[in-house]
Image: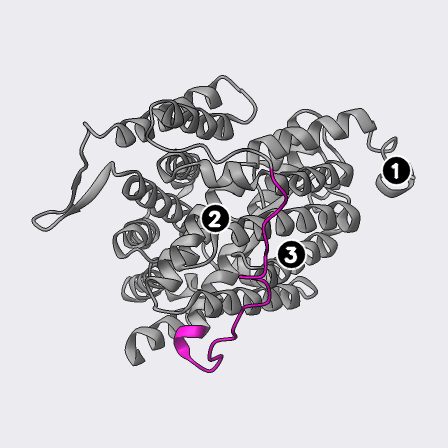
Amino acid sequence: MLEKLFHLNKLNTSVKIEVLAGVTTFLTMSYIIFVNPSILSKTGMDASAVFVATCLASAIGSIAMGLIANYPLALAPGMGINAFFTFGIVMGMGLSWQQALGAVFISGIFFFCLSVTRVRETLINSIPRTIKMGIAGGIGFFLAIIGLKTSGIVVDNPATLVGLGNLKDPKVLLAIFGVLLTTGLYVRNITGSVIISILTITIISIATGLSSFKGVFAMPPSIAPTFMQLEIPDLFSISTLTLVLSLLLLDLFDTSGTLIAATERAGLVDKNGKLPRLKQTLFADSSSTMIGSLLGTSTVTTYMESMSGVSVGGRTGLTSVVVGICFLLALFLSPLAGTIPAYATSPALIFVACLMAPSLKDINWDDITDYAPSVITVITMPLTFSVVDGIGFGFISYTVIKLIAGRHKEISTAMYILTAIFLMKYTFL
């Protein structure tokens, strides 16, 4: 049955290798079951329900990817997008978390529609690579400032806007140690470096009396507080349009980057460098986003951590199915999720920011009309605490600078349209 479903022999793999790859991928991305509830609960969402929604959405998405597309790619609520959900949409734009879930659902529908047409390739290709890299780097810095703020390493200062936190606070010191520990373990190629760091900081915290132990295993809590609670925002509002557009672009960039990197590493692209079953892959991804919003979590996307499973031999969808099963088993870890303090998970945000920072090297640093808009994007995201504003300022500055420089031929039609949409957002709001 497994051979018929996943073509193991054809892809020169085995059940043993695929299971090992699935467990490896799960260990490298399992931190999301603790980090996601910590982030989304700041909107007022029930943390226990978000924990269940995170596990279920990740399980459904990963299993769907394995069965529909037969690729070793795992899915879960995306890091960066979940922070945007909380700090950008709910806290920044003033939407309720129910409306934010509605926006995620709509973006999933749009993503699905783009996935069955060629509009997706046209849209992605029309946005300059230098802007894409700026967006990736900007989201990294956005995650970093959230992690620094949550851990207490950086605090608000009325005189200088921000300042250094209290380094005598043991919680702050543990957060700093968490960043160093995660990075060191990662360099040593130790599987699950992030989750090991989170658990280590939690154990130290409990042992020193900084937090209390609530247990490890229990029956899954109720998902009722978030299940089917989404509300569709005003679709005719410019602010809603730019919000959905931003969510769509983030998911598109995230998924496309992971697909390219993981499938090339696994040798799954054809002789022309194209990915077979691309529509099935994007169908699984976009459907998972819609299902995730119904369950009660932010955008579900394909995880770059899938590369860890590929690196140990994962080649088929059986790897993804194993990841999904692991997420279902993780449903029984809700007491542990409630035990882990915020300063134990915040180092994960800073670490992921470090992993995203190298994208800045791919910005075209030889042309100021390319790198100036990228720098504006990178700076704007963390300082305005808004991914939408970072994308908007990047698009607008790119188009205007190119026009002033007399290089209008370098601007695509799609960029003109996107710029106009964001200009309307800032003009009429």
Mark 1: few/some/many CA within 10 Å (<14, 14-19, 20+):
few
Residue 227 inside the magenta-drawn segment: yes
Of callouts 1 and 3, the N-terminal one:
1
> Residue drawn at (46%, 52%), measured in percent from left and top?
82
> Residue drawn at (30%, 55%), measured in percent from left and top?
385
Residue hosting label 1: 2
Tell me the kind of residue under disc 2.
Answer: Pro
Residue 197 inside the magenta-drawn segment: no
Determine if residue 256 is in view. Answer: no
Residue hosting label 2: 37
Q: CA distance from mark 1 to mark 2?
A: 34 Å
Check disc 2 and report its element: helix, strand or loop: helix
* 156 and 46: which is toward the camera: 46
The magenta-colored residue range is: 218-240
Residue hosting label 3: 288
Q: Residue furthest left?
A: 159
Residue 112 is situated, as x and y percent measured from the top left of the image, at 65, 64
> Residue drawn at (45%, 55%), measured in percent from left and top?
128
